[in-house]
Image (spheres, rainbow, N blue to C red):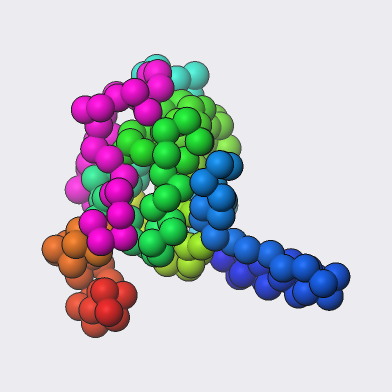
Amino acid sequence: ADRHVIYKLAAKEIADQQGGALTFMAKWNADHAGNSLHVHVSLWDEGDRPLFAGDEPLAGTPASASPVFRGFLGGLLARARELSFFFAPTVNAYKRFQPGTFAPTGIAWSWDNRTAGFRVVGNGPSLRIECRIPGADANPYLVYAALLAAGLEGIEKGLDPGPVFVGNVYEAADLAQVPHSLGEAIGLLEGSAFAREAFGDEVVAHLLH
């Protein structure tokens, strides 16, 4: 997260020195793909042992995974909608979620599938989850906080992510959807008992304000 912020600041400063300007708006032009902040996440113990790797075949994929992986992914799927404000904090951010633009609209996990909100890739120690929901205007510290909170709850409760999604997520109307507006995301966060438990009432109140 530190490197992400420093990179953006440096890029803006360099552009300014050349008489230009950079924007990290999530959807700077309606005719072009959006500006994303895809985050790859995995868990490792203090001895540098990858905790997502395991011996259980991950059905529908060439990978094997651990119960920790399944729980973490299950938590992400369960809490993605109510934590969407952490991933998309502006009005403009929700203009990015359009079918066919490689920005997700459906809450699903899939193997190496860029139409899914959660794309699973790698195997063994490289097994990881790519969260494709955040836009470039998101605060990376809040993105990580949301992913960790949801994933750790999933591990604690043994939440199962269900079967891998196969196909085009944009065409799956029965999936839970990424919120369509900032107003919808605010309402979901406001009503989230999980967010208040994970971050505290004062933090949630501050974000809502």
**In the picture provided, is 93 more to the left or to the right than 183?**
right
Can I make out residue 25 in this image? yes
Q: What residue is at 34 percent from the left and 23 percent from the top?
A: 171
- Residue 117, position as x, y percentages in the image: 40, 39
Residue found at the very far right of the displayed protein: 18
* Main SS category, magenta section: loop
- Left or right for 26, reference 60: right
Residue at the spot 30% in from the left edge and 48% down from the top edge: 180
Residue 15 placement (x, y as % from top left): 78, 68
Q: Which residues are magenta?
A: 155-184
Q: What x and y, as percent, mark residue 90?
A: 40, 64
Q: Residue at x 18, y 67 (%)?
A: 190
Q: In this orientation, which residue lies closer to the viewer: 168 or 64?
A: 168
Q: Quadrant of the N terminus?
A: bottom right
Residue 4: quadrant of the picture? bottom right
- Pick the residue in front: 92 or 136: 92
Q: Is residue 68 above or below residue 9?
A: above
- Asked if the stretch drawn in magenta spans residue 161, the answer is yes
From this viewpoint, is residue 74 visible?
no
Q: What residue is at 58 percent from the left and 42 percent from the top?
A: 32
